[in-house]
Image (cartoon, rainbow, N blue to C red):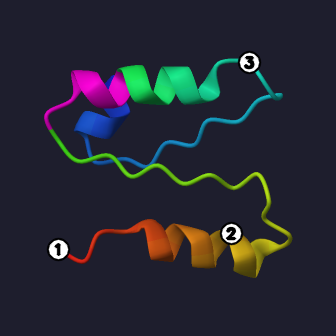
Amino acid sequence: MVELLKKNEWVALLGSRMSGKTSLAKAVSHSLDSRVVYVDLIKSKNLLDVLTRIYQAMPLT
């Protein structure tokens, strides 16, 4: 996952609740020098909602 992020690839963590996805994402983000965007999609209802949440989480600069 770190290598993909270093290559500017998108990475999605999928798994059951309480499986450590957020902990893994935070640990990886702390190991990188670049900016990481975290988007919680747990309450997303449809694809438009997912895309809207991702868009809103993106930094302006």
Decide which of 39, 51 is in the foreground and name it: 39
Q: Is residue 16 above or below residue 50?
A: above
Is residue 46 on the magenta stretch?
Answer: no
Disc 1 element: loop
Please name the residue that numbered disc 1 is placed on. Answer: 61
Asked if residue 59 can be seen in this view, the reply is yes
Q: Main secondary structure of the magenta part?
A: helix
Percent from the top left, x then y, of residue 56?
A: 48, 75
At 71% from the left edge and 36% from the top edge, which residue is drawn?
14
Whether the residues at callouts 1 and 3 have beta carbons within 8 Å, the answer is no
Position of the C terminus, as image quadrant, is bottom left
Q: Residues within 10 Å of mark 2 (few under 14, many from 20)?
A: some
Q: Earlier in the sequence, mark 3 or mark 2?
A: 3
Q: Earlier in the sequence, mark 1 or mark 3?
A: 3
Please name the residue that numbered disc 3 is placed on. Answer: 19
Position of the N terminus, as image quadrant, is top left
Distance from label 3 to label 2 (Cα)? Answer: 21 Å
Q: Is residue 41 above or below residue 9?
A: below
Residue range highlighted in magenta: 28-33
At 44% from the left edge and 67% from the top edge, which residue is drawn?
57
At 36% from the left edge and 24% from the top edge, which residue is drawn?
28
Whether the residues at callouts 1 and 2 have beta carbons within 8 Å, the answer is no
The type of residue carrying mark 3 is: Ser
In-image side of 45 versus 22 (left or right): right
Whether the residues at callouts 3 and 2 have beta carbons within 8 Å, the answer is no
Percent from the top left, x then y, of residue 35?
A: 23, 48
The type of residue carrying mark 1 is: Thr
Disc 3 element: loop
Q: Residues within 10 Å of mark 3 (few under 14, many from 20)?
A: few
At 46% from the left edge and 49% from the top edge, which residue is drawn?
38
Please name the residue that numbered disc 2 is placed on. Answer: 50
